[in-house]
Image: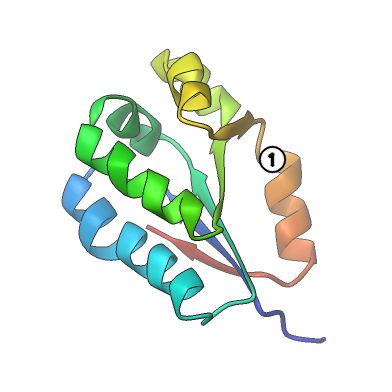
Amino acid sequence: MQTSNRLVVIWSSNDRDVALQMVFLYVLNSRLRSWWEDVTMIVWGPSAELLSYDLELQMELERIKAAGVKIQACRKCTDNYGVTEKLEDLGIEVIYMGVPLTEYLKENRHVLTF
């Protein structure tokens, strides 16, 4: 199997320090320093609710998007937390993630979870 130079980061923690000190920092630097050819960040579970109201995380998300990271969120999760519209307003692609994640795995993308 051929290895991929594409990364998917699944952010599911509602711990803002994990977001700022690990997830966002690594995702941003991955693009700015060209560590990966393609980077996708998926907002999944409790992280969706945290992002919906945390202004500092929202500002950092703008920097990440500007660096070229693709941002997606799990629609089932955002619906469950009642934050779908808020995340869409932040410019996040909100979709059901089962099929896309399965495709990413079949494409041999590297997947990290936080």
Residue occupying image coordinates x 54% and y 36%: 73
Circle 1 residues within 10 Å: few <14, some 14–19, many ≥20: few
Q: From the viewer's side, name the closer residue of 102 and 51.
A: 51
Q: Is residue 103 above or below residue 73?
A: below
Name the residue carrying label 1.
Answer: 98
Left or right of 110 in this view: 19: left
Left or right of 35 in this view: 11: left
Question: On the rendered image, what quadrant is the C terminus found in?
Answer: bottom left
Q: Quadrant of residue 20?
A: bottom left
Residue 4 percent coordinates (x, y): 71, 79
Left or right of 79 in this view: 50: left
Q: Is residue 69 above or below residue 33?
A: above
Residue occupying the far bottom of the picture: 2
Residue occupying image coordinates x 42% and y 18%: 83
Residue 94 percent coordinates (x, y): 60, 30
Per the image, label 1 sits on a secondary structure element best described as: helix
Residue occupying the far right of the picture: 1
Q: Is residue 92 above or below residue 103?
A: above
Three-letter code, disc 1? Gly
Residue occupying image coordinates x 53% and y 24%: 88
Residue 74 percent coordinates (x, y): 56, 33
Say if residue 8 shows up in the picture: yes
Residue 1 percent coordinates (x, y): 82, 86
Residue occupying the far front of the picture: 66
Q: Quadrant of residue 106?
A: bottom right
Residue occupying image coordinates x 33% and y 33%: 51
